[in-house]
Amino acid sequence: MAAPKLSIIIPVRDDERLFRLLASLLESPELKSCELIVACNGSRKQFIDRVSSVVASAPCARVLTDDVANPARAINNAAEIATAEKLLILDSDCVPCASYLQSLLAELSSHRVLRGPINYTGTNTFSRATADWRQSFYDKVASEGRLYAPNLTIDRSLFVSLGGFVESLRHAYDSEFSDRAMREGETAVLLPSAIVTHECHTRVSTEVKIWFDYGCGRRYRMNGTRTTQALVHALFGDLPWKAILNHPLQLTYALAYVPVRAAGFLYSAAQDT
């Protein structure tokens, strides 16, 4: 078998939605040109066994296991053993469009970093509100060339040289990585045809924990900046203001999101002192 052109990295912890993603990838003829690495972190043995059984039919696949539930660490570990020169980072709750791998493979050699569009969806009232919020936010940052995962393709050598993801961050590790990359002059080229659908969490408690972790990650990103200045930016600097001001539901969402993210920021700041 020829060396793979692309290593697909999927960090996961007991997420049943992974099997929908794997089914989609396994149906793609272009998978024969790829290496598939599923990085199970903190997963149950039964789940790992199911993953191993499903990916056994892939031309080139590996399942990594780690007792520690840490997606940033899982991705770093997968990147370390990847054999392709390009890495693709996907979340387990994503589903790619039919021509996804074909679109990516056609553009791999032309760019150091590629980022595809993300269509956010929800299955209940709260997750649909989350989807609308995230869509507004990510449409804004996509136009800025940020290197956000999921749906990020990057030179393995670049990922390694930048130090990979910070493993102390539970969420927002890709945002912090993007900051470092962009300081080095790297930006992501948007590939409009490489679309994934991203399903948002249905439970409020799960999403609120993520907001809190976003605040912790923002404090890490702004380390060395005066706390008041950093907090103001953490609260308001990157919000999708147009969507917030035009849609009452988005304003309501922001009124819940901002204080929780601020709490994460202040908690992280207190840990530093």
Image (spheres, rainbow, N blue to C red):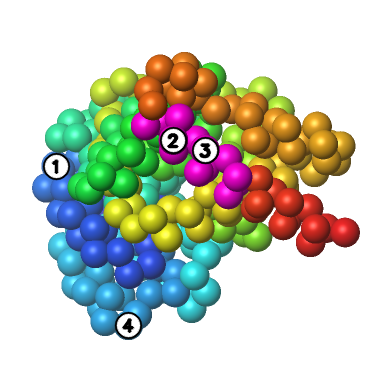
Secondary structure of the magenta portion, mostly? helix
Residue 191 lies, with reference to residue 149, above or below; the image says above
What is the spatial separation of the Cα atoms under label 1 and label 3, in whole angstroms? 46 Å
* Quarter of image, res 267: bottom right
Q: Which mark is residue 252?
A: 2
Q: Are marks 3 and 2 in contact (CB under 8 Å)?
A: yes
Amino acid carrying mark 1 in the image: Pro
Categorize mark 3 by other alpha carbons within 10 Å: few (<14), some (14-19), many (20+): few
Q: Which residue is mark 4?
A: 45
Foreground disc of the pair 1, 3: 3
Locate residue 92, reporting x and y percent.
Answer: 32, 54
- Circle 4 residues within 10 Å: few <14, some 14–19, many ≥20: few
Q: Is residue 224 magenta?
A: no
Rendered position, 24 above or below 101: below
Give coordinates of residue 270: x percent, y percent. 80, 58
Going by the image, does 93 lie left or right of 152? Answer: left
| Cα distance between the residues tagged 2 and 4 | 41 Å
Q: Amino acid at mark 3?
A: Leu
Which residue is disc 1 drawn over? 29
Check whether the beta carbons of the residues at disc 2 and disc 4 lie within 8 A of each other. Answer: no
User: From this viewpoint, which residue is outermost toward the bottom?
Assistant: 45
Q: Amino acid at mark 4?
A: Lys
Amino acid marked by disc 2 = Thr
Q: CA distance from mark 1 to mark 2?
A: 44 Å
Look at 33% across and 52% down and name the residue there: 201
Label located before the other in sequence (1 or 3): 1
At label 1, counting other C-alpha atoms closer than 10 Å, the crowd grade (few under 14, some 14-19, many 20 or more) is few
Query: Which of the pair 52/180 is nearer the observer?
Result: 180
